[in-house]
Image (spheres, rainbow, N blue to C red):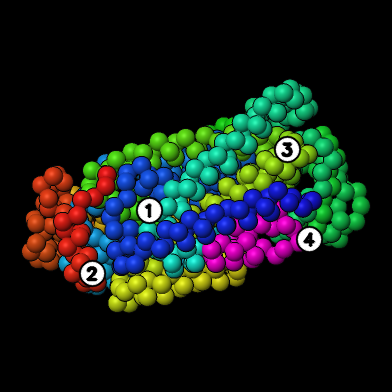
Amino acid sequence: MELNLWAVAAILLVGLATFSLGFRSSRLASTTQDFLVARRTVRSQRNAAAVSGEYLSAASFLGVAGLVLKDGADALWYPIGFTAGYLALMLFVAAPLRRSGAYTLPDFAEARLGSRGLRRLSTAFVVFIGILYLVPQFQGAGLTVHQILPTLPTWVGGALVAVVVIVNVFGGGMRAVTVVQAFQYWLKLFAIAAPTFVLCVLFVGDGGVRGLGATGLSEAAPPRFTADTAVNVETDVVLHVEEPVWLTITGRADSANADGVAFWGPGTHTVDEGTELRFTAGSATPVVQGAPSDNRTWLSPVTGSGDLFTTYSLIIALFLGTMGLPHVLVRFYTNPDGKAARRTTLHVLLLLGLFYVFPMLLGALSRIYAPELLVSGRTDAAVLALPMKIAPNTLGEILGAITAAGAFAAFLSTSSGLVVSVAGVLSTDVLKGRVRDFRFGTALAGSVPLLLALVLRPSDISLSVGMSFALAASTFCPVLLLGIWWRKITWVGAAAGMLVGGVLVLVSLTITTISGYTGGWAPAFFQQPALATVPIAFLVVIVMSKATQGKIPPDTNRIRMRMHAPDRLGFIRDRDVARFGTAEERSRLANGRHRR
């Protein structure tokens, strides 16, 4: 692949703009409240853009298009679930959570149920979810930079993102990150919308599928290469061949060395790492085993009971996991009151719905123009590779640079939110809650996931993030929903539900990871276990709470009234100002007017 200087310049500009905005905003941050919750003065519209910028991660910018390319109609549950989760958050969680006066999820758990032990358990899960979510962000950044600069190792992109994020969060915490994330949402929207419009116009101008001689997306035939294509296989892969195909192999395939022309009949074929496959124009495209092999199947919904379990698990994980993601919930603590938090969520629904139209279109176009990604299994690179496939000239380079800039912004914005949420919990629950403690927590929250990203094998970005949603849905979602809406929940029930749900998901994650290194023997339901783990977690919370009614906190009615009373009654109180705030800060927060 040729060096795209436009893309290199675009990535450098995004990094520079992110650093500049963060540096300017960090000059206004000096107190613990600035670093944790931006002094709770973020307007609804800006906060909605910041939430959207943070939420639209690598799984959204790269992963959704890659999954649509590979799985077709089945992958549409991802953008639907990613967006619909905010509907539940708006209806049941956003306003009461803000009115609780908490600063972090563990702080809310202690405020509602009065248990330091539950707070420590919540801290552990916040840190683990943050790390589990950060690792694919850094790996995706490495993929992006390696796609643009193949001579650089994949760790360079992850290291670059980690450094920029740590510097920004270190200097200004939530106050700096809010401005950066709001800017990056609009940058990402432009970076995916503008190329999509241009590529669709070029596709129609070329006569669509008929003009290319490609297989129609509704035809019962595999996708075909529109030009002579060489595919470098970077990891061992098992391919399914639907139609016989002649190709040239240099390397090792089907457990034998090969260097020349070969014939592949229908069935499965193994290809080892480092092998080069060359296909001629018009050849049927082999696909990674497990993916739809022909376009009609690709366009059809789920067809079997195993598929249905995975689909429903995915829906549950995305719909309920959103309200349990620490880096999402921490943004609602920055709103001045409950009404502003609910209004923020409504705006987020609109912004996300607009964004997700474009990755789906790019995934469908990639099925036509970039079928070689189905051979290598690197479908997450579809958004980056597609512009040069449709417009292989300067226009394609410029469009590719724009998408690369958007992808890099996605890594930066989501990583920033995750690092802020983990650093905030580490500083207030593990350390003493001072500004220097927050900064030390920032260094830990950024460096540990980076090391893991370098050690662990990259997997499908959206599937990795999907497991994070399953963990959040199985731990924090039951505690939040029942803690806000059920008077009889106890800390014993909450802790038991979090442990059972969390352990079940972590066991599934461990089995899936080991299976991936040892031949893929694990059943599919271990990859997405939320359909089982979430109901079990809710049931455990309810049963254990019923069995320990003597543990109901004595101030339950007061706390619940604060969460559900209208904002204008003035019951909102910040919990931890007395712990690490100065007298001036306490006076300003108590008497100052907040912007809405």
Q: Secondary structure at mark 4?
A: loop
Element at label 3: helix
Which sits in the foreground, 353 or 161?
161
10 Å crowding of disc 3: few (<14), some (14-19), many (20+): some
Closer to the chain start, of discs 4 and 1, is 4
Residue sitting at 29 percent across and 63 percent down? 33
The local crowd at label 4, few if under 14, some if 14 to 19, many if 20 or more residues have their Cα within 10 Å, is some
The residues tagged by marks 2 and 1 sit, at their Cα atoms, a distance apart of 24 Å
Question: Residue 213: percent from the left, percent from the top?
Answer: 78, 27
Is 306 in front, or is 460?
Answer: 460
Residue, disc 4: 274
Q: Amino acid at mark 1?
A: Val
User: Magenta segment, principal secondary structure?
Assistant: helix
Is any part of residue 151 visible from this angle?
yes
Q: Which mark is residue 328?
A: 1
Residue behind mark 2: 581
Q: Nearer the viewer, mark 3 or mark 4?
A: 3
**Is residue 217 shown above or below 452?**
above
Query: In the rendered structure, which amino acid carries the disc numbered 4?
Result: Gly
Q: Amino acid at mark 2?
A: Gly
**Residue for point 24% across, 60% down:** 102
Element under disc 1:
helix
Residue type (three-letter) at the residue carrying disc 3: Leu
Query: Whole-percent x and y of residue 6?
Result: 70, 48
Q: Secondary structure at mark 2?
A: loop
